[in-house]
Image (cartoon, rainbow, N blue to C red):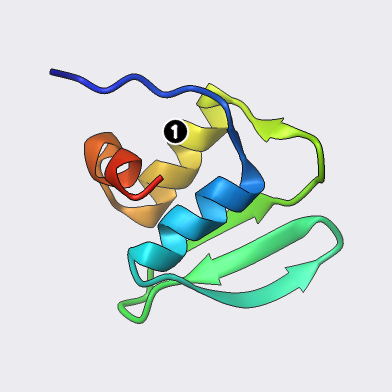
Amino acid sequence: MVASLRPLSSRKVIGALRAMGFRELRQKGSHLVMGHPDGRITVIPVRSGDEIGRGLLRKIIRDAGVEVEEFLTHV
């Protein structure tokens, strides 16, 4: 079964990425850059009250180099 994405808060996205080994590298304004020890990098917009939409969420997951199903197990 293919898991479907739904909009998520940036806090949940950051938590899922942390659970997969990503760490905060730097932040400039409302953009948090997270990196994995193996070199993968992704950028997460951090705006309180806003959710990250499905399209941008899919890009973050693709940049992180993980499958949607794996990402959703950590949310």
Q: How many discs mark residues in the rendered view? A: 1
Examine the rendered structure and indicate whether residue 20 appears above or below residue 63.
Answer: below
In-image side of 1 versus 5 (left or right): left
In-image side of 52 versus 64 (left or right): right
Examine the rendered structure and indicate whether residue 70 appears above or below residue 17.
Answer: above
In-image side of 74 versus 2 (left or right): right
In the picture, residue 51 is in which quadrant? top right
**Which residue is at 43% across, 59% downward?**
17
**Which residue is at 49% across, 45% downward?**
60
In the picture, residue 2 is in which quadrant? top left
Pick the front one: 45 or 11: 11
User: In the rendered view of the protein, which quadrant contains the N terminus?
Assistant: top left
Residue 74 picture location, percent across and down: 34, 50
Pick the front one: 15 or 56: 15
Examine the rendered structure and indicate whether residue 71 appears above or below residue 31.
Answer: above
Residue 18 picture location, percent across and down: 44, 66
User: In the rendered view of the protein, which quadrant contains the C terminus?
Assistant: top left
Pick the front one: 13 or 60: 13
**Which residue is at 28% across, 44% downward?**
73
Q: Amino acid at mark 1?
A: Arg
Q: Farthest residue to the left: give it.
A: 1
In the picture, residue 14 is in which quadrant? bottom right
Q: Element type at marker 1?
A: helix
Q: Farthest residue to the right: give it.
A: 29
Residue 22 picture location, percent across and down: 43, 70
Examine the rendered structure and indicate whether residue 22 appears above or below residue 6.
Answer: below
Residue 15 picture location, percent across and down: 50, 58
Residue highlighted by disc 1: 58
Report crowding for label 1: few under 14, some 14 to 19, many 20 or more residues within 10 A (C-alpha).
some
